[in-house]
Amino acid sequence: MMRSPLVGRAAERAGLLDALARCRSGRGGLVLVSGDAGAGKSRLVAEVLDGWDGRVLRGAAAPGAGAYAPLPDVLRAVSDGVGEVPRYGEVEQSALFDAVRRAFRDSGRERPTVVVLEDLHWAGAAAVDLLPPLAEAMACEPLLLLGTYRGEELPRAHPVRRMRTALRRGGRFVEFALRPLTAGQTGELLAALLGGPPSPRLVAAVHGRAEGLPFYVEELTAALAETGGVRRGRDGGLDLVRDAELPVPESVLDAVLVRTAGLRQRCPAAVEFAAVLGVRVDLLALAALVEPQDADRLLDGGLLAEREQEPGWAEFRHALVRDALYRSIPWARRRRHHHLVAEHLAARGAPPEAVAEHWIAAHEHERARPLLLAAAERHCGVHAYRDAAALARRALALWPEGTDPEGRLTAQEHLAECAELCGQLEPAMSVWADVARIRRSRGELGRAASAHRRGANAAGLLGDCSRAVAERGSAADAYAAAGLRAEAAAERLTLADQLKSAARLTEGLDQAVAAAEDAEAADRTDLKARALAMQGSLRSALGDGARGVALARSGLELALSARLPEAAGEAYYELGEAFGYAADYAAAADAIDSAIELCRAHGVTELGRVCFTCLSPVVRLMGDWDRSLAICGEVLADAHTPDILRRVAEEESGLITVLRGDRRHARGPLRRSADFGRVNEVFGMEVGATWGLAMVAALDGDEDAALRTVSAMLERCRLKGEGHYALPALRWAATFLAERGDQDGTARCHRVLATAATHNSAPKVLSALAHANGELALAAGDPTRASAHFGRSLDLLRGISAPYERALSQLRRGTALAGEGDRDAAVAVVTSAYRTARRLGARPLIRGCAATLAGLGERIDERLGRLAARSLEPAGLTRRELEVLHLLADGRTNREIARELFVSTRTVDMHVRHVLDKLDCPSRAAAARRAVELGLTGVRQEPRKVRQ
């Protein structure tokens, strides 16, 4: 039979040759070749590399080949040419990556290199996870990584799937997927193999059996030729012998058996043991288990091929050959063979996972389990945690109930730890819950508590806040029941902080009180100080500001007297929180500033970073918006800032930005913060960011989106009942809804505030409620009652530094006074609101004040100045900018506009930039469309095409 050609792979061959050309010119990277078993991946790669004049390095993965296979094969070859390379397991994964990257780079620079990594479907996560960064590192080097794998053997969680995703995200995904041959291509291959044109019947028979896979076609054709199943017809074509059937009853299995029948008759034990050893065959093991000359016969007969780069090892010429031969071994004999192989490999000190595979196949699970666990420990030692978790999980699956329960629990804990370290948080959380349940049932409360705590940590990282709170509470209770009161206090403090962030204030206070009791019992002054300070901030948040501040002070004094800097730093922060909840923002800022100074003096970096970030909402509430923005800018510029603090800074800066009328730069940060706050139950962040998004929609003129966002915010506020961070948002929402005539929405906002006031009667809460009462009265057409409510709201804010909220209530009181007919009082109060809004830079509020005064007949430029008058112009555009916008919407270029208005082109350039900025549009065409939407042009039709 003739040598088979490469059929049906022209496009793939051309693509690989192009990749080689790029590699030769210094643009390497990673190329994948995938396909079903028998698709011809290795054959394609071999043929393409046949004319390659550079260096070729090869490695192949196999079951049980080690955590980083197939890289060790390549590293051994590389180290011969470019110097010593660290062995895997001797260094951490990051260091190993650096070593591999340097070795590959040096090899490529010495001589263009192709590294062939075969059978990645058998590779472990530790090796596969290195490939995307290696691909990026080699993108500008003369080294090409060429990987092959079987696509049909990839389970959903296989590391190759993650690799493909990472490559696709990085724009480096290049893959040639080998599809089955068509019937025509099968006929072409048959003609080449048999030396003549096949008949349609022969093509149909072989193609149907082989399903288009070249290997199947080749094996079936070889079997037909050897058994005389084909004959030459009168026309010179080849056909099946009359009444003959293909010598493959059901599958290619039979074709392989027919092809290897002679070899199996001469040395049956060698063939069987080779199949039992796997696709990669350890020749030393094979020679020890059978007659050495029989091992040579397998090599001479072509069943096995020696691996040039790995002396002492061979491999089947195709995995399907091994699979077919393996399945042909009777079950009992197969078990016995695996038993003997396992004993031999164990005696030789083979890797435990390789030995375990054979004990499992021999159905001697009790001998496999400890080896799997040892292999998991070994993989942990080289930081291959995902593979270690898989090995531990497999060991547990083989563990019968009731056998060595303590060992099983230890294995479960090991599995959970490995799962945590490789980011498999859901399985880790589930396993920790099982461990905790079993430890509790055995009365081991301390160890159960530790498992609950680990489960809480995993749940928190997953964003499952309710599960995290439940697990944390169980941990605290178990620690307390075990007499470990200090550990119980620490867990309760963490839980209290989580509950405070989620606006579950009463539950948080209960935990803080219990934490103080546990700390007292454990004689832990640091924990008691923290617990008292936490109680203080929570009581203040619940409306008892005086008692809350006193409690927080007592915790601070206790920490300072005991010279406990970290506890004192936390107590200062909680005192600041207590002052903030009591609406004494200046005192809150002073307390947090003290916390920051103390943390810096004593090197308490993490807490200091938290305090510094959380100062931004305090100074924003007291009206120092520029300082708040400066803090946020510093936080966001720090590369070491944790995600949660980064989101706080984005929420605060985004909120101030949109309060100042700049929606373009606020939208993205506010969306990220709202999502983070909602998922992680950080209610202050969530409500602030949601309020900001509602204002963005309102400034966009998207009333429906704004109303939907406000409605969602009201529902969240109703569920939480929080009376601090939500108050400015609810005050604004009441006005927003009332101005749009949404009486139901205004009443709903009022109900949320009224409910909050039943639990918290602090002046700031009652002030927001009075403001909502004023909006309801205005909506009902009763300006006198509305004026009284707005006046009450302002009286309750006396002594509270909340300038934005005060200005908003002043503006609405001015509207009510005007409705009563008291024009002079209305002008005075709205003018005061305008001055506050101008100091803050709150442009939307400035426009509202100017519009109200204009409605009262005031000359805005005379009373408030040209800036206020300009704010009343459409979209904040000047008269000249409106003229430019008219001409721009008419399709004029800047040069044409300059001639029309008798100004320079540079001046028009400046006006166009201002127009785009004020309309928040990325282009001239978008500005023209926006102008039509806002009615800023003299035409209603679509603008003509704008020349850029």
Image: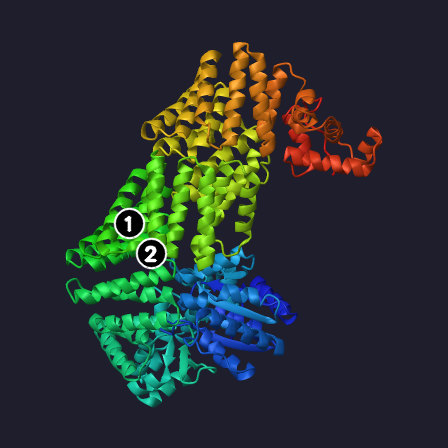
Where disc 2 sits, the SS reads loop
In front of the other: 546 or 381: 546
Tell me where residue 15 appears, x and y as whole percent: 59, 64
Left or right of 597 on screen, residue 452:
left
Seen in the picture, residue 31 relative to 879 is either above or below; the reply is below
Question: Crowding near pointer 1: few (<14 within 10 Å), some, many (20+)?
Answer: many
Q: How far apart are marks 1 and 2 (CA)?
A: 22 Å
Look at the image and tell me in which quarter the C terminus lies.
top right
Residue 237 visible in the picture: no
Q: What mark, if any, has residue 706 been given in the picture?
A: none
Amino acid under disc 1:
Arg
Colouring rule applied to residues: rainbow
Residue of label 1: 492
In front of the other: 7 or 675: 675
Residue furthest toward the top? 821
Q: Which residue is drawn at 52% across and 84% down?
A: 80
In front of the other: 598 or 477: 598
Residue 881 visible in the picture: yes
Where disc 1 sits, the SS reads helix
Residue 227's quadrant in the figure? Answer: bottom left
Looking at the rendered image, the disc whose residue lies closer to the viewer, 1 or 2, is 2
In front of the other: 600 or 149: 600
Tell me where residue 572 appears, x and y as whole percent: 40, 48
Residue 68's quadrant in the figure? Answer: bottom left
Question: Crowding near pointer 2: few (<14 within 10 Å), some, many (20+)?
Answer: some
Left or right of 648 on screen, residue 15:
right
Residue furthest toward the front? 561
Residue 482's quadrant in the figure? Answer: bottom left
Tell me where residue 359 appears, x and y as whole percent: 25, 74
Amino acid under disc 2:
Ala
Q: Which residue is drawn at 17% across and 64% down?
A: 405
Residue of label 2: 562
